[in-house]
Image: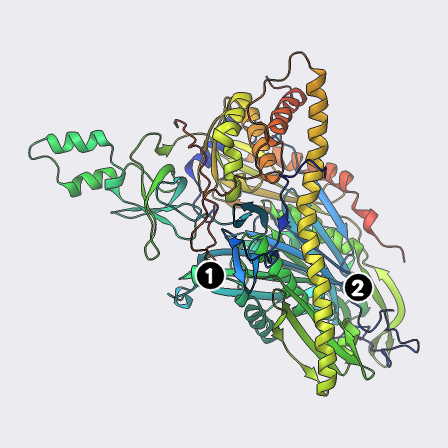
Amino acid sequence: MDAPMVVSTIQRKYVIDLLKKGKRADGRGFLDYREVKIQTNFIPKAEGSAEVYLGESFVITGIKYDIGTPFPDSPDEGVATCMTEFIPFASPMYESGPPDIDAIEVTRVIDRGIRHGDCIQYKKLCIKAGELVYILFIDMYVMNYSGNLIDAGAISAMAALLSAKLPTAKIVDGNAVWDGGYMTIPINQIPLSVTFGRIEDYIFVDPNMDEELVLDGKISFAINETGQITSMQKSGEASWTEEELIKYSKLAVQKVNDLRATLNLRQYIPKI
Amino acid sequence: MTENNNDVREIVVPGEILTEDKNFVPGRGAIRQGNKIISIYIGLKNISGKFINVVPLRGKYRPEIGDSVIGKITDVSSVKWRVDINARDTAVLKPRDAMDVYDKRSQRGRGGGKSSREEEAETMKKFGLGDMLIAKIVAVDRVSDPTLTTVGESLGKINEGVVINVDVPKIPRIIGKKGSMIKLLKDFTTCRLFIAKNGLVWINGSSPELERLCIDAIRKIEREAHTTGLTDRIQYYIQEKKKERGLK
Amino acid sequence: MTILIPEDYPKTLINKDGKRIDGRALDELRPFKCKIGVLANAHGSAYVEHGKNKIYAGVYGPREVHPRHLARPDKGILRVHYRMSTYSVHERKSPAPNRREREISKIIEDALAPTLFLELYPNSAIEVFIQIVSADGGTRCASTTAASLALADAGLPMKSLVAGVAAGKADGKIILDCGDLEDKAGSADVPAAVRMIDEEFTLLQFDGEMNPEELEISMKYIKKGAREIYAAQTAAIKEKFDRIRQETEAENKIIEKETKKAEPKPVAKVEEKKEDPIEPVKETPAEPKPEPEEPTEKSEDNKEETK
């Protein structure tokens, strides 16, 4: 229907009735992730790019760079910033205009996952301390909305970062100049995120659109390769008990490890 | 494609010349352009008598009086409901079109009973925001929004099951000739079904697996609506999937 | 904004052998590919790859106009939103919409509106969203091609498909379908789109210098290119449905075989012998108008009790 802002009462009932039976409408178990499809480096003018389908959620992320000045409190570190745009054709609910609060939330959660995850080695993105560093732009465009954009976005951001090639620089007369070479973006660990949806006391992974529209709440964990939680976000009005949070943080570590193994994102690193 | 399959219709695109023969007349989905007749849709070319038609493969629902539709209440005021019927305009349902016949009779019979305003206020409690209804279109015109009624057999609020969205022009295929496809879907998946003219299908089965099978079969019909031999194929598909998924 | 590798334009665009920098003849198109029905939620959608342009178009509508004051009581409006992804170009584009995007959106609206029956949708809007994922010169032309396909995919009645392509001038020669470098380093650019039913120009801009004779050659080239693009648009649409047909015919044969094997007890046939693919329209309007009505099929009512 064209106005999914009003969720139908039977849709919620349908989802809940199934959950009570331990089932989900698309046949998945509570801990089954949807299929992920990835394609990288198909945008010639982007330094890196990735197209990711998580079920029917579809995100295209590209990496661009700029040479700029570092932040004063980290003069020898490069910078990476995320942006998300929901393209209005992705859902009849979206309108054109500045990013809405959902897009901002998706961006911030992914951004924190990358920033604190020992992911990008920012020091290697420094050309001249205090003056010249790489500024990376991780720009995510949601092409089709079908639930769980945080996880889909995080996968696409990491795949695009890994697939990227940056021109390398030397300093000539105090300016950064291309030295003719390229490097990959130095990445230590690959953080990925996993999101659980919640309706009443039923908690399940990777909510699809039908589920997301009737959820009471969600919780996302970003987790790096050493099993450290690097970002969390509780959204929606549902509250969580301490026991649940402990249980699902552990499950999240497991799920992210599985996902990381299945996706094998390092295969997208280009040869230089 | 084999020779004897002469009922396989050609797929045409907008602006495609259907004929330059002056003996033909443009029917539905076709217009005259100079001395040619052209298609205005992506669709199936079909000649009946001297008319050339193009049956579109996709398109938005256009309400017509008498259509049974499935709608969702998207707004409630004190005097009416607004119902999303998957069309360009949202439809209107007024309480007097939602009162049970029984209600009307009993209320009227009582001397000094409720005023009609009170009755209507009472009726407004029947449906709430987000409720799904099966309704009939009682009025449509170019200037005002379509009007609905829920008074009548098999009309009213939907309380369970699942509703899916399909391409409107494919609804006749999901129904089948003389309802043959519906019957097949019901018989072989044991689900209850209501196929509404506005591209929405209500499904209610005894298990989510059977409902999913029914939905998968409907998706297949939708995808293959322009082909022949569909009924046999759907029957075969359902039987095979039942074996594969271990369903009875 | 500083980047390490500035864009570099070649000095000559036509080689000694008369071929262009990418090896094309003067009147040769870049590789072209398209597909409809690529976005799950949009009412209609298309993907176009034209050279290294990669473009998605999605359509919603007719639907209510927001903001309301833009609505017209006599006819529907077509709104096109052309946007470039930040990473589609050499130097990152700012994510904020700019005037170039606004202008291109408008000329694409003007290119497509005359192919639609907007008078059928008073007070409503048909909205087309175009996203440039990768840009390679001639995005406005390729966007028009994509948008036209997406509108057709949405099942909206249309008089014609529209095909977009540019001509240009490089090293004194007229060329068809400028690539990015030819676009930027050439001496003229004529982006255009052609309504294929009558081959009239519905999008036309010009930037550079040409004499009228050169413009004439450009027009001829554009029409030639547009015909080739139209052929590819048509083929992509038909192929999609024909492929499904072929699949189903193979399935039909399997079923036929299995049914024979199962003799003497054939599978319970559910009536019907030869069925019509989608109910044909029995009654046709006496006065054939461009009435984009859904086929009013007279199928049996599907009676079913509901709970």
Q: Residue furthest top?
A: C264
Q: Which mark is residue A125?
A: 2
Which residue is depicted at the point 39% across and 52% down? B89
- Relative to residue C100, is residue A225 drawn left or right? right
Q: x%, y% of residue A31?
A: 64, 32
- Does residue B235 lie above or below B224 as drawn? above
What's the distance in space between the residues labelled 1 and 2, CA to CA?
A: 48 Å
Same subunit: marks 1 and 2? no
Measured along the vertical axis of the image, is residue B170 above or below residue B192? below
Q: Chain of mark 1?
A: C
Q: Nearer the viewer, mark 1 or mark 2?
A: 1
| Kind of residue indicated by mark 2 | Leu
Mark 1, other Cα within 10 Å: few <14 / some 14–19 / many ≥20: many
For the question of whether residue A72 can be seen, the reply is no
Mark 2 residue element: helix
**What x and y, as percent, mark residue C282?**
47, 42
Relative placement, left or right, of A184 versus C150 is: right
The residue most toward the front is B23
The numbered dot on residue C125 is: 1
Circle 2: is it few (<14), some (14-19), or many (20+) Cα within 10 Å?
many
Relative to C261, residue A129 above or below:
below
In the rendered view, tell whether residue B207 sits above or below residue B27: above
Q: Residue at coordinates 55% horizontally, 42% vertically from top-left?
A: A209
